[in-house]
Image (cartoon, rainbow, N blue to C red):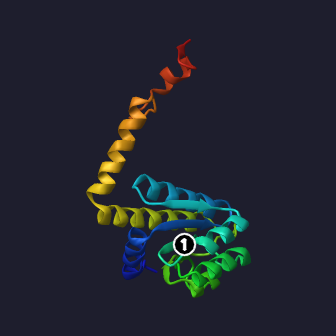
Amino acid sequence: AQLDEQAVQAAAEAIVGATRVDCYGVGVTSNFMASDLQARLYRMGLASNSYLDPHLQLISAATIGPRGVVMAITHVGGMPSLLEAVDVARSQGATVIALTQPGSQLAALADIVLGVEVAPDPVMPVGPEAYLAHLTVIEILTVLVAQRLGDKAVDRLATIQRTLETRGVDMHHHPRLDWDEGARITLGKVR
């Protein structure tokens, strides 16, 4: 199935217009996705948080307000604690965006569904296909948000890059290291 273009455009609009974007994840992979999206939004200057603990998700949901956005990320879409937090956020008037399987319980509660359908993994409950699909949707969403923010996002990202570079954080790509040479290098010293 293809990503619903109208849904991803609506999600980008909601995020750009939000007073706060709280990203919720459930499970190892979804937690990573929620944290990654939060960091991307924050770097572009948007007020954003990542809540991975169910109790903090409920606190976030209770305080988010009608101009807030909750981005709930979970492939399966049925974890009771996440569904409760989403329900509370909706009761506060927040816009709920779900990155999940279409037809899941989470999708039914969301205002905007970024539906991801992948073939079931024969070994794991959620396989690498779902992970890659979710990451792709986050990448698309991030680009759409950046386009809407325009110079504000570009200026913010440039400021961050300058700050990191001037404080010793390595921001440059490195040429491929020759394996023979790499074998002789240990902690910066040539053997």
Q: Nearer the viewer, residue 38 or 182?
A: 38
From the viewer's side, name the closer residue of 122 and 59.
59
Give the residue displayed 39% in from the left and 36% down from the top.
163
In this rendering, would 133 be left or right of 12? right
Up/down of 149 relative to 169, above or below: below
Image position of 104 with respect to 69: above or below = below
Task: Report the residue at 61% width, 64% height from top.
Answer: 30
Q: Could you tell me which residue is drawn at 37 percent across and 79 percent down?
A: 5
Q: Is residue 92 left or right of residue 146?
A: right
Residue beneath disc 1? 70
Kind of residue indicated by mark 1: Val
Q: Nearer the viewer, residue 56 or 138?
A: 56
Residue 168 visible? yes
Q: Would residue 33 be seen by someone viewing this image from the given angle?
A: no
Picture residue at 53% right of the left edge, 18% below the top? 188
Q: Quadrant of residue 74?
A: bottom right
Residue 108, compared with residue 177, is above or below; it is below
